[in-house]
Image (spheres, rainbow, N blue to C red):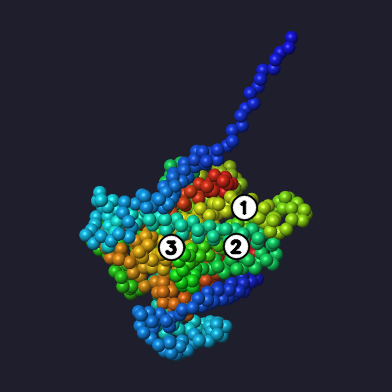
Amino acid sequence: MTIAAPAVPTPRIREPNWFLDFCRQQPLGAVSFVIICCMMFAGIFSRLVAPYDPLDIDFASILGAPSWEHPCGTDAYGRDICSRLIFGSRTALVIGFTSSFIGSTLGAVLGVASAYFGGRIDNWIQRFMDILLAFPLIVLALVVVAALRKFVIGGVDVNLIFAIAIPILPRVARVVRAAALSVRVMPYVDAARAAGYSDTRIIFRHMAPNVVAPYLIILTAFIAQAILAEASLSFLGLGVTEPTAAWGLMLSGNAADFYREAPWMILFPGAAISLAVFAFNLFGDSLRDYLDPRFRM
Amino acid sequence: MLRYTINRVLLMIPTLLGVAVLVFFMLRVVPGDVVEIKLRGDGGNVSQETIELERKRMGLDKPFVSQFGDWMIGMATLDLGKSMWTERPVIEEISLRLELSLQVAIMATIIAVLIAIPLGTAAALFRDTWIDYVVRIVTIGGLSIPSFWFGMLIMLTLLGLFNWLPPITFTPIYVDPVANLTQLIWPAMAVGYRYCAVVSRMIRSSLLEVMNEDYIRTARAKGVYEKVVISRHALRNALLPAITVIGLEFTFLIGGLVVTEQVFNLNGIGQLFVQSVSRNDFTLIQGMVMLIAAFYVFVNLIIDLLYAVFDPRIRYE
């Protein structure tokens, strides 16, 4: 008698869905992700979403209070604030993303290189980072703005992007260097070196992938800082200039003179900046908790 | 310890020199200077000759290296030169505004620390309860709301409630403390929120770390009251990292008040900085950057030394 072995169903190993996993573990992170997606949608499809043209001047409705026609009111030129906010999200996201990406990536490369080579090169890079760190973020950005002057390509303020990216660089380099130092002593790095791989290859193929987590975390955190810096610079009149719609710019100049008559001119743009920065900060925070539970704060 | 301190002080010199080189050349790479803005700013029709003459008078026609040399020699004798715009000594221009900026920074520190210690402690002790979540949202809010907008909200509230706005002329605190405080307490609050958020997050995380240490378990095992464990054993050690953030945020405020000063119409260092940037006033920008950088390097040194004082395990050799 033969007993047929009951077919044991091999348990299907489910691919862990990192996205669902993230949402379940970090509900606050999921909320912030939704906010970011909404903002990106508004930024990309501004033309479709915005009820009015952000540059349309309408002298018949100057400083109009929020109403059904103009949900956030109108400004001193009768422009629809809601539409300007929607177009402003494009400015904020483009400058926030690119400057944080440039600053973080260059910083990460420098940080990894610094940790890999060690010795004198490490020392020189670190001293240079110390010099950059001696400037507060906004002060360094101001100096770069002063040095670069206005420089616009395709409607994007390139000088502004660099002014914000440069102060980010040393801050990222420090964090990534610390992470890379622990990777450097791993046996596989020694193995790669023994195999005779070039320095560039070891840095990019063996070390960089292992510092991706801190890199991503700090990248999102600095998007928030970059949006804040852009708003501050535009507010000071040294960033994006009229008539481009930008949140910081909407708060500057005559907006301050309308405290009494038109508080909505101040309330809505500021709320937009805060919400955007809040979302990226929260997302970065949750990402850190998710990717690296050791650093859980 | 003394050797370490001397070593560190000497190490400040190359850093500051680097800052000087960086600022000096960064400002001069791209053409355009104060003379053009001064004489041609409003579309004035000034001949090239006049401009060259003015440049010569200011020493802007000399090669960069010799200009840099002049500036360095001046700095070595504590002379930062004259503002290119007002032609008054840079030191005088700065010291006129420093009092106000320093006072706001100190007041913001006091407000922030007073709120941050209980907030951060509560968040750590009640970790993952609603208290922790509320503190987390409040502090991330502090990191997210731009200080200048928070300042505007404060002004709007004052206007709405009392139909009153803070005075815009500065009275030193030793002349009239009431007038001084009614002006400066608001900007201090505006920047204090962010400050408080940064510090309380630090306190929370370092307290969580400390609570896992052996000496906390020992103290509890000895039967020490939980209150004493927290205040005497845990908090004391957790405050060290907080001191670092407090120091760094404080230096940040000296230069970082830039935008908030604009909102409250304060004539401080930040305002001066923005003005001199838009006027291409190189000497003044350089002077202020050097001041802020020196301050930063100095505070960092103090922090490191404080670590050694407060934490007997740390010894610098």
Q: Verify CB contact (< 8 Å) between mark 2 and mark 1.
A: no
Q: In this figure, which residue is indicated by the disc labeled 1? A: A211
Q: In this figure, which residue is indicated by the disc labeled 2? A: B308
Image height check: is B90 above or below B209?
Answer: below
Q: In this figure, which residue is indicated by the disc labeled 3? A: A155
Q: Verify CB contact (< 8 Å) between mark 1 and mark 3.
A: no
Front disc: 2 or 3: 3
On the rendered structure, is A167 left or right of B262?
right
Marks 1 and 3 sit apart, C-alpha to C-alpha, by 34 Å
Instruction: Please determine if labels 1 and 3 lie on a single subunit.
Output: yes
Instruction: Please determine if labels 2 and 3 lie on a single subunit.
Output: no
Image spot of residue A16 (x, y percent)? 57, 37
Q: Chain of mark 3?
A: A
Task: Tell me the quarter of the image containing the N terminus of chain B.
Answer: bottom right
Q: Chain of mark 2?
A: B
Task: Tell me the quarter of the image containing the C terminus of chain B.
Answer: bottom right
Amino acid found under the numbered disc labelled 2: Ala
